Image: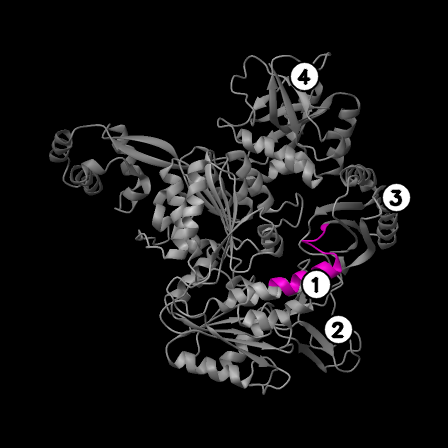
């Protein structure tokens, strides 16, 4: 038998299958196996993507060296999917395959120096065995090894390190009858107190064994007592694999099935019909905030499980995942697995193993969960489908929605895209009949949408010493807190202030690595770059003219928090942004504390705008609605409308009436005016007119080609060469814009130039981009990288 293998070498010349002979002793090789193969002078990891009985290569073939896993990591569906995505995304297939696996299944490599002669083995540096090249430090040893390599007295051996491992635990099981233990206890010496505790526990809790070592340790039974118990044949010791449970500490209680209203039931009936019929139909579930989309999802998952199928559900933000997981787990219990980037490597690996071993049939997770190794999928759900976070912004640049459509077709199952503010792309496809539109026009509890007031900052009086919170907004916040009700406050900008300005010379403190000013973070008293991570201590004099007259302008979440504390006595504020949610479990901790009434105000960036459901929140405040409009991107108005509509929907979700205050310098902007009345249909019509005029999606497809280098002239030169190639190869109807420097021209000491291709139908695009991909491989050695992004979320 012979195997076709994709090797773990990301390069154009290796982006193909290599054929290997399967030795007779390797019995467990199958499509999807992770293997070690000889490749040139080294050994590398690879993935088996096909097996056949006859060799295609006529010469002598090398053999597979090793199969790395007992359980085949890649199901056949994902192997096929990797081929399709590599072709669609113009990326290497190995990059797709690696993205499909948890990081613990990505091999590491170690370079060993192996002595080949007796004299070499006798040298002190080797002491008769191979050594890790990374441990060689002294110049004398390096010179010695180079000499041995040159004379063939030693060789370099590349070893693939498998990082995959389960957490181990020790359990103790009983080996005698209860009557035997009673007899042992009766004959025990009087001063054997710890042994008596153990024997009494065995007798009183006989049916509870086997027990984990930690459970016995909690009773005060130490390891030496357990060791003696094993030696005396009172207990049997066994080491077992256990799963790390990321939700073990959460208090999740079973929930009752909610009775759906007529609108919800009508939508559910349409979805359930396709689950039963096994049809790959895509639904767009458009429901206003609070309309009960989640309940429709849960009922559809229940129908899926009833038909012995599995279900996959995606949410856009890690911040949303704990609440959504709790809702799904309260309905379906241990049949739910969770996958997102806030889990530890071990937790992700164990959850992935549960899914791969078919021990769970419902998966909830963020973008990468779209590659969960679920089999027999009966339903795929993407909640808040309009969110940009579903698009991967580095290689491989896939969109979870596009992958979901492919998995839906493979599994013959429906896909549900849900949102209060669907993306224009999805809404346009629904209008054309490609997707089926399902609408929820009313809130599930029949409550009215919250009232929205726009505060014109050009005319407002400001509270405090800063120009952030208006007097009107502050007064309403105070009244809400006085009524023992809660407030959500949105400012989509973290940090304390946006930049440092010298009032003497006008100097602005910039990041040395990026074309961006440093942000001031007061809690750590440092200036930070939000792009490359560069940070320095806060300056007290101007670095240029040494004046002490420096000020910090602009506002972030930290400054707003400080202002509110100064203006509202005894106010309790929880801040939720990237800075406060770096630690594991911090999302859950903040949201749980707010849900339990431990704070009056939840202040945060856009991560607090979506999906959160707190019954006591009656006021939502947007400090500055114009931040998103200032972004030089074609979809800035859409993103602003989405954000304002979503955050407004957090108010008044239970019995109490809700109010939303939006501060803006642009009260007449259509995105802000229409978000204030949650009129998605009118916004859709208005925005589509602008997109049509500008030749932007969904009227045109787009491809962004980025050219990146540490040498700006070199990046610019290559950008113009690639532009010339595109113009020459593509048809005249296709629009090629650029090259231009990106909005932030330098990030982390790399200069970015970009070319935008807009087209409706371009027969030569695939061939041209494939050529550019090959060309990029050739010029990469000159410190130039070229990236191709199909349907980019951000064009700046």
Q: Earlier in the sequence, mark 3 or mark 1?
A: 1
Whether residue 109 is visible, yes or no, is: no
Q: Which residue is mark 4?
A: 62
- Cα gap from disc 1 to disc 2, whole angstroms: 36 Å
Q: Which residue is mark 2?
A: 508
Q: Label for residue 471?
A: none
Whether residue 280 is visible, yes or no, is: yes
Q: Earlier in the sequence, mark 4 or mark 3?
A: 4
Residue 176 percent across, percent down from the top left:
19, 28
Left or right of 485: which side holds 747? right
Q: Which residue is mark 3?
A: 728
Name the quadrant containing residue 144.
top right
- Cα gap from disc 4 to disc 3, whole angstroms: 43 Å
Relative to 161, is 515 above or below? below
Magenta-drawn segment: 684-701
Dot in front, 4 or 1: 1
- Cα gap from disc 3 to disc 2, whole angstroms: 43 Å
Residue 512 percent across, percent down from the top left:
76, 62
Residue 160 percent across, percent down from the top left:
61, 30
Dot in front, 3 or 2: 3
Q: Which residue is mark 1?
A: 690
Residue at x 40%, y 49% (from the top left corner): 298
Decide which of 666, 78 is in the foreground and name it: 666
Q: Earlier in the sequence, mark 2 or mark 4?
A: 4
């Amino acid at each position: 038998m012979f195997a076709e293998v994709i090797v773990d070498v990301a390069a154009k010349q290796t982006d193909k299958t290599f054929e290997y002979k399967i030795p007779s002793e390797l019995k467990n090789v199958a499509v999807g196996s992770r293997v070690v193969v000889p490749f040139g002078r080294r050994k590398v990891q690879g993935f088996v993507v096909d097996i056949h009985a006859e060799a295609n290569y006529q010469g002598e073939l090398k053999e597979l060296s090793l199969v790395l896993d007992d359980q085949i990591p890649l199901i056949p569906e994902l192997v096929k999917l990797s081929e399709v995505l590599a072709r669609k995304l113009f990326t290497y297939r190995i990059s797709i395959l690696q993205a499909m696996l948890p990081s613990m299944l990505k091999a590491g490599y170690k370079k060993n120096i192996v002595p080949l002669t007796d004299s070499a083995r006798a040298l002190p540096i080797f002491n008769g065995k191979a050594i890790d090249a990374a441990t060689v430090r002294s110049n004398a040893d390096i010179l010695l090894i180079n000499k041995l390599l040159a004379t063939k007295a030693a060789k370099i051996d590349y070893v693939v390190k498998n990082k995959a491992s389960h957490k181990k635990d020790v359990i103790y099981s009983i080996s005698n009858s209860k009557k035997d233990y009673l007899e042992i206890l009766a004959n025990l010496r009087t001063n054997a107190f710890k042994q008596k505790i153990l024997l009494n526990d065995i007798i009183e809790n006989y049916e509870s064994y086997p027990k984990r070592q930690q459970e016995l340790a909690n009773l005060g039974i130490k390891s030496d007592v357990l060791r003696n118990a094993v030696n005396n044949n009172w207990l049997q010791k066994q080491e077992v694999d256990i799963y790390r449970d990321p939700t073990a500490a959460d208090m999740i209680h079973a929930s009752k099935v909610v009775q759906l209203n007529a609108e919800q039931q009508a939508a559910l009936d349409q979805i359930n019909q396709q689950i039963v019929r096994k049809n790959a139909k895509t639904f767009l579930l458009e429901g206003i905030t609070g309309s009960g989309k989640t309940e429709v999802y849960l009922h559809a998952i229940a129908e899926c499980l009833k038909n012995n199928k599995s279900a996959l559900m995606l949410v856009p933000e890690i911040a949303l995942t704990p609440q959504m997981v709790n809702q799904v787990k309260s309905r379906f219990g241990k049949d739910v697995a969770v996958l997102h980037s806030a889990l530890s490597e071990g937790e992700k690996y164990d959850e992935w193993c549960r899914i791969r071993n078919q021990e769970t049939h419902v998966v909830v997770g963020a973008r990468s969960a779209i590659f969960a190794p679920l089999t027999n999928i009966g339903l795929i759900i993407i909640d808040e489908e309009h969110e940009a976070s579903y698009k991967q912004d580095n290689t491989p640049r896939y969109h979870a929605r596009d992958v979901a459509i492919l998995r839906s077709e493979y599994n013959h199952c429906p896909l549900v895209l849900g949102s209060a503010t669907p993306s224009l792309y999805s809404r346009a496809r629904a209008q054309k009949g490609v997707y089926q539109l399902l609408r929820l026009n009313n809130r599930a509890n029949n409550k009215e949408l919250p009232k929205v007031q726009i505060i014109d900052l050009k005319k407002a009086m400001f509270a405090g010493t800063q120009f952030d919170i208006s007097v009107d907004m502050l007064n309403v916040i105070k009244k809400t807190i006085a009524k023992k009700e809660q407030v959500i406050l949105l400012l989509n900008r973290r940090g304390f202030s946006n930049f440092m300005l010298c009032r003497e010379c006008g100097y602005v403190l910039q990041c040395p690595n990026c074309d961006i000013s440093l942000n001031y973070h007061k809690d750590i008293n440092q200036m930070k770059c939000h792009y490359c991570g560069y940070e320095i201590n806060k300056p007290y004099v101007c670095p240029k003219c040494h004046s002490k007259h420096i000020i910090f302008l602009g506002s972030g979440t930290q400054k707003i928090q400080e202002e509110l504390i100064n203006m509202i006595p005894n106010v309790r504020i929880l801040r939720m942004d990237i800075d406060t949610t770096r630690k594991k479990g911090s999302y859950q901790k903040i949201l749980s504390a707010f849900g339990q009434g431990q704070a009056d105000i939840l202040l945060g960036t856009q991560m607090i705008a979506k999906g959160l459901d707190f019954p006591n929140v009656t006021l939502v405040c947007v400090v500055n609605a114009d931040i998103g409009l200032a972004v030089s991107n074609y979809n800035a108005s859409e993103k602003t409308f989405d954000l304002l509509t979503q955050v407004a929907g957090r108010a008044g979700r239970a019995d109490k009436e809700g109010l939303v205050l939006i501060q803006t310098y642009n009260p007449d902007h259509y995105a802000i005016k229409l978000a204030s009345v949650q009129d998605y249909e009118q916004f859709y019509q208005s925005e589509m007119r602008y997109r049509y005029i500008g030749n932007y999606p969904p009227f045109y497809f787009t491809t962004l080609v980025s050219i990146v280098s540490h040498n700006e002239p070199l990046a610019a030169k290559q950008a113009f060469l690639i532009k010339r190639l595109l113009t020459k190869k593509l048809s005249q109807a296709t629009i090629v814009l650029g090259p231009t420097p990106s909005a932030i021209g330098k990030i982390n000491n790399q200069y970015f130039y970009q070319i935008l291709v807009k087209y409706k139908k371009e027969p030569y695009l695939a061939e041209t981009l494939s050529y550019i991909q090959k060309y990029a491989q050739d010029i990469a050695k000159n410190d130039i990288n070229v990236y191709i992004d199909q349907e980019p979320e951000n064009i700046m």
